[in-house]
Amino acid sequence: MTEENNNSQVLIVDDSRVIRRAAVKILEKEFDVVEAEDGEDAWEELQQNKQISVVFTDLGMPNMDGYELLEKIRSADDPAIANLPVIIITGAEESEGAREEVLELGATDFIGKPFDSLSLKSRAKAHINYRNEVQSLEKRAATDRLTGLATEPVFNEQGEKALAYAIRHSAEMSVVRFDIDCFAELFVKHGKDVAEQVLAKVASYIREGMRKEDTAARMGVSKFALLLPSTSPEGAIPVVRRICERVERLKLKLGNESFHIRFSAGITSPEITDSLAFKDLLAEADLALEEAVAEGGGRYVHFQKKTTTPDAPRMEQVDVNLDNLLSQLSANQSVSPQELASAMRKIMPLIGEADKQLRLGLSKVILHLQNKLKP
């Protein structure tokens, strides 16, 4: 078997053991050959074996004949099966009308029996090589050249599927948007080559930090996204934290100058409803990312839908002295809600900086407080 075809198998479907063994003898030196004695046997093999790259099938067989098998293959839900090359093995008894019928059903090619070794091998090789080339092109189109991550169309397609699954099964899911802080400045200052090295390295950290079931993509010049199926907020945050921490440990040295890469992230873990669209999740994650960048970058923010509380006290801005306020509290003197709210607004930058430097994991709490304390 040649290295070119070492991951491809040929399925021979015929109720005649003599025909099957003749095909195996011709092909076995160059291909892995799988046998099936009728359409039912072949269909079961196709469901279980993802290595089959081309099918040779007789038409007249018991249980399930070649017409039914071909129709079943072409109407399969799995595109990998539906697009398989199917070559019909024809005998002298097959009429021109039978050939026309299987062509209408989607037959790829014909080969007569008894077949000669050259015809059988050439057809197997041609169809397998063509299929491998198509799959290779599809794979390259689905992958960003620089980072090796999925492209935006592929990510959106996977997201739609994950959301449909979550809706059907009442499952959770999370979506994350990442951006490299101040990437434009880095590009202008250090040039394209350095910028691309940074992008490739960041992408490698995303791949290392994500789980096998997750999907990562490059969504723009310096923007990335991560799809986390069946993942709650509690499950998403450790994945995002792990990726961000790895990126922030990346230190680049150019001549006498060295600098760290800072990474911001926005996370959404929505309540799954029938009316939810995947574009809504991307928009929510983008809003959270914008908030993370606005807070100074180098952090992650979890999206929170803003709600109103009619009965909550108004948080007007009043002038407060923090030392005096602390003295009042120590003396058990009453402090108004407005004074407390104003004091909290004063110390929010301190809390944010402490969260960033000490990695306290308070981003969600900070976002909640900021929403509550708006005057």
Image (cartoon, rainbow, N blue to C red):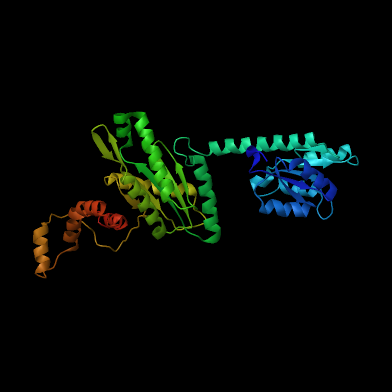
Work out which quarter of the rendered image holds the N terminus and state it: top right
Q: Is residue 260 toward the left or the right of residue 37 in the image?
A: left
Q: Position of residue 196 (x, y in %)?
A: 38, 34
Q: Nearer the viewer, residue 21 or 374?
A: 21
Which residue shows up at 29% across the image and 58% down it?
365
Any part of residue 255 in sight: yes
Query: Could you tell me residue 157's position as x and y percent?
Result: 53, 45
Looking at the picture, does residue 99 appear above or below residue 175? above
Quadrant of res 336: bottom left
Q: In the image, is residue 129 above or below residue 372? A: above
Nearest the eye: 243 or 291: 243
Q: Residue at x 37, y 56 (%)?
A: 238
Rendered residue at 37%/30% (across/down): 193
Asked whether the viewer can see residue 375, the reply is no
Q: Position of residue 94 (x, y in %)?
A: 88, 41
Q: What residue is shown at x 31% (from left), y 47% (from top)? A: 292
For this orientation, the residue located farthest to the right is 93
Q: The C terminus is located in which quarter? A: bottom left
Q: How many marks?
A: 0
Task: Locate residue 285, reporting x and y percent.
Answer: 40, 48
Give the image quarter of residue 218.
top left
Q: Of 178 and 165, which appears nearest the observer?
A: 178
Query: In which image quadrant can residue 55 be found?
Result: top right
